[in-house]
Each structure stands twice: as structure tokens, then as C-alpha cells.
Amino acid sequence: MKTFVCIKYVPDTSEAEIKVDETGQAVDSSRFSFDINDADNYAVEESVQIKEKQEGTVTVVSMGPQESDVMIRMALAKGGDNAMRIEDSRINTTDPLCVAKVLAGALKDKEFDLIMTGCMASDDGHMSTGVALAEELGVPHASMVKDVEVVDEKKVKVSRELEGGLMEVVEMELPAVLTIQTGINEPRYAPIRGIRQAQKKELNVLSLDDLGISPDEVGESASQIVLNKLYVPEVVSAAEFIEGEPEEKAEKLASILVKGGHV
Amino acid sequence: MWGMTMSVENQTFAEKFDLLGCIQCGRCTGGCPVTVRTKLNPRRFVYDSYNEDLLDELSRLPEIWDCSGCHTCAVRCPKGLKPVEVLFGLRNMLVESGKVEPTVRDALESTFLEGNPWSKPRATRFDWMEGLDVKTAEQGQKVENLFFTCCTIAYDPRVQAVAQNMVKAMNSAGVDYAFLGEEESCCASEIMALGELELFNELAEENTELFNGYAAKRIVTLSPHCLTAIKKYEGLNAEVIHYSQLLAELIEQGSINFSGELNEKVVYHDPCFLGKQNGVFDEPRTILKGMPGVELVEFTRSREKSLCCEGGGGKMWAETESKEERLAEKRIKNAKELSASVVAVACPFCVLTLEDAIKALGYEEEMRVAEIMELVGELL
């Protein structure tokens, strides 16, 4: 099984105070810590577990700055065989379609059975890159995957997590793209000894020119998304507790909605 | 020292830990405080670990994570062995396989990436200094007392006052001191206990180089865990002491003047990493006795016999399965029997575990846990 796993270097914003920088177009990330995107970490673990059961190779793919090499080395220490990092300031990274086009450009000539991504990036939360990547490559995809069973060399059976906790089980022809949901496994720890050994594994740094992709296809001009402004929503205190019997509550609520012109 | 001896790759497990020296007297298990509430039996592990074929299986037993690293076993061993390090060695095997609990994994990864086990950004490490007149160290500039803050004290708002009050105390005493800036990284005490020996060695090397860059006469740690770890670094050109040693000296010299009175009955809990492991028993008591209005009482189990709070040995990130009464709760009940209104400690982990115990027992109205520096702060 030849697997490619796409990972993203993201800020941990779980406890941090979010501030928009002076450009008004980006978040000030100077006080954040960065690490692998949570869902991508599960995708790495899943790809390594499949390799351990089925044999094969795992190639780590990421688009990001040089600082993210540490994350790539950690993924290699966990069982990845080699890696490629794409870095080019001309890519419009705010548009998941542009990102998917770049990834597709990097993968289209490779021989692969499975491509895994996390189902969602914790920074922009688009949930689109993996699905768009499948479209660009012209292969089937399954999103929000919570279980992967390799049926044979040409087929996998995957469980998709749907609304309300339902599981949808699908059999898919390979090659395919899976976007992995968190909780599918328990990601392992990359020991320091392993990270040191992973320094010897191949990590290719590639630009758009190396991939033969024109900046016109993936740059700002190609994007259908225009980022106007980022702002932190204002905190206002306008909560009103409606008291009374259910009928009274309903009447008061309806009156508020009608008077306020909300309906 | 374990960290360095383990790097001798060709040694067998039995050779690394001198297991053949064990006479199976059982003083380790007999003294181990956690055996009363868990399945852990240090003597058994020392005996079984001699068999190389069993090591993998032993490393997967959950009770190796029950050890709180208090070192009672090592203190009591008549042959000078350290059963605690055998357990850390087994943890090391599991860490190398990558298959550790998520809490342990996250603490180790955070230390590797951000220099602290609390999953906090490096950039916010010294937010606690805001608004304070702190002297920070500059490379090459001579300083007598170079302070090492500790990850827990730097990031946990519950214990940040330890560092903040230390700044006030040093400023008022006119001491030549400086705190490390953003370059400070974890001392790796708990990293070693969690079994990530390679990371310990890496941090020890980086920190030694960092410390030696500042021409400090001595390094003063705020946590006894940092004290213990930094003392293990090789090639350090400075003495390493705990803040209680410096403060006791200043009080004896009359350089620190307390104002007001505390009027509390205080019982001092000896942290294992300060007492058992570093022999610092008197200095914290000297500070407490120097505070006006303090009535100092003693636990029956004090000094070398102090009961471990279970906060060390990486236990902040590895929960014990046992539902039996926690040792910290036992300790707080002892404090209540003494009618103490304050349980004074000199360790951030002891603060956290003992305070949890007070809450679990519902004693919040009757007593409180206070780091000695918090009490100092009340009288400055």
C-alpha cells in the first residue's frame, strides 16, 4: 500500500488570546505555539498503522515554512519513509482550492493507493482541502473517516461519521482520498531518538517551479476567495431571559422577533 | 547518574542499574509510600528486570506509572541501589516504542517543541513578570544568583506568586540576582521520570551551555524538582541551590525584614525532592520560624520520613488507576489532627496535590496550603 499523508503546521489557539495584526488581514501569531494539525496527526497514525499491517510506504506531504520541518521529522519518526515540503510565497494559502491544486500538482505523477488528510484544519476550519484534492486528482474520496479496513490491494472499507452519531460504511475502489476524523486511533509519541534518526530520511523542499505549476493557477489572481477583513466579534450584553409559562414565553418571544423585525 | 550511564549503549539493563547488587532485603518495597494504594512492588521489579526476556512485558505493566519518584526506596536501600531508576528505565522502553498514554505523549511533545510540559507557548513563559521590576540576565554579565523559574511556576497562575514574591524579596534585600529570560527551557526533571531519557540529555546539554554563558556564581531554583535535575547536569560551572537556602541565609543575616504578623499555626511538609533527595530540611524551617506570629508544628512523619504527596515522578501527567485514598489526603488529615491552619510547602507540585486534597476533603474553610514564598509575600 503506497500512502501519502498531507499534514499542516498550525497554531494552537485553544487557550490563546486571538488578535488581528495591523494589516487587518491576518491573525498575530507571535505568541502562539505551532504543531501538527490535530486531525492530521490521526491521519499520520492511521497511515503508519496500515503500513505496519500491510507493508508499503508512507510519504509525508506538507505545505508550509521551514519551521514546520520539525513537525515533518516527527511524522517521519513515527513511521513515515520520506517527505516533501512545498514552500512558495506565490501560493494563495487562504483558498483551500488553490492549496488542493498545488497538492494535486505534487501528487499527480506519483504512484499512490491512498491519500490521507485530516478532515479539518484547526486554524481556518474549511474542511475542503482533502475533498478538493480528490476532485483535482479525479479519484474518489470519503470524508470524516472513523475507521479504515483494507479489503485487498484495490479496495478499502471505511466508516464515515455522519450527523447524530450515525456511521456510514462505504467500500471504495483505490486509489482514493480519505479525510480522517479525530478519534480514529491514538496517535503515538515520536521519541527524540526516532526524530534524530529521521534526520537521515529524505525531505524534499519544492517550489511551484519544481512542481511545474504556474503561479497564475494557484496565486491570488486564480482564487475565488477575497479576504477583506478579519475582526474579533464585538462582545455585547443583550441577553434577555424570558420568564413565564410556556405559552407566555412563546408569545413574548414571538413579539420580540416580530417587533425587532427579525422575522 | 542514570541519564549519563544509560547513554552507555552496550550495557545490559541489569548492568545499567546494578541489579546484581540487590540482596532482595525488601527495604525498598517496605518504605515505598504508594504500595499502600497501588500494586507497585519495587523489589519485584528489581528482581524480574534481571531477566532480559521479561523487560518488554514489565514495561507494559501499568504499575510502573504509580511511582512518584520520591526516592524513599533509594534512601533506604542498604546496597545503594536506586529501584526508582529501574522503573524509569522500564518507562524509557515504553517511550522509545512511542506507545505511551496521551497525557504523557503531550507533555513530552510540548517539552520538545516549546520547552515546557504544560502545552504552553514559549512566547508566554515570562508573562508572570508583567508589571514587576525584574532584573533579567544578560549573557556574559556577572551575576551572583541566577534564578531558574520552573515551567509550573512560570505558567500556572496558582503558583506564579512564588516567582513574583521572590522578585520583591530580592529587590528589597538588595541581592545581586537575575532571572533567566525567554531562553529558559524545562529542567527536564519530570521528563526523565517519564522515561524520555534522550530528551533529558538534550535539554541538560542545552541548559548547561545556557547557564555557563551567564557568569553566575550560583543557580537558584524555585522548585526542588529543578534543583534535583540541574544538579545532575554535567559540566556546569556554578553551584545549584534551592531558594530556601538563599532565603534562610538572608534572614539569618537580617537582610529581609518582615512587617506584620501571620498569626497562624503552620505545619511544614517536607517535599521529597527537597528533603530526601537534597538533604534540605532546616532552611525552610528557618524561614518559617523567622516569620512573626508563626507557630511551627511538625508532622509525625517529617524530614527523611516525610510522606510523599505523589506529585513527582511525572505523576502530573500519569494518573494512577487506584481509587484508594490519595497520600495527599492522608497528609491533609494529619495536618487537621495537628489543628494546623496552614500547610506550608516549598514545591509547586506539593501545592497542587495538597490543595486538591483539601478540596476533596472539604477542608477549605479550616486550612490552606501555602508555598513558603506566598507566606513571605504576605509579610513583605
Image (cartoon, grey):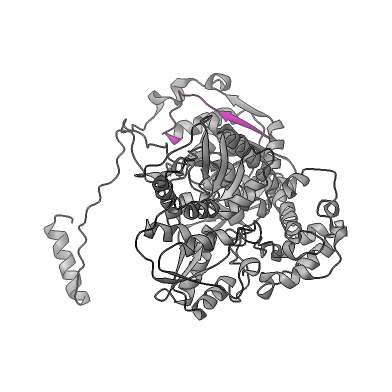
Q: Nearer the viewer, residue B179 or A213?
A: B179
Q: Is residue B131 above or below residue A106?
A: below
Q: Quadrant of residue A223?
A: top left
Question: Residue A123 at x, y = what percent?
Answer: 44, 42
Q: Examine the structure image and report whether residue B118 is included in the region drawn in magenta.
A: no
Q: Nearer the viewer, residue A154 or A57?
A: A57
Residue A85 falls within the magenta-colored stretch: yes
Say if residue A4 shows up in the picture: no
Residue A17 visible somewhere in the drawing = yes
The dominant secondary structure in magenta is loop
Q: Position of residue B65 (x, y in %)?
A: 67, 62
In this picture, residue A229 sits left or right of residue B15: left
Looking at the image, the residue that sits furthest to the bottom is: B337
Relative to the observer, which residue lies in front, B86 or B61? B86
- Residue drawn at the location 22% of the way across and 53% of the way down: A236
Q: How many marks?
A: 0
Q: Is residue A244 above or below residue A195?
A: below
Task: Looking at the picture, tell me which residue is in the foreground, B195 or B250.
Answer: B250
Quadrant of image for the N terminus of chain A: top right
Left or right, A261 with reference to B342 = left
Q: Position of residue B157 (x, y in %)?
A: 42, 55
Q: Residue at horizontal 69%, vertical 40%?
A: B234
Q: Which contiguous range is marked in magenta?
A: A78-96
The x and y percentages for residue B300 are 60, 76
Q: Residue furthest left?
A: A259
Q: Quadrant of the C terminus of chain A?
A: bottom left
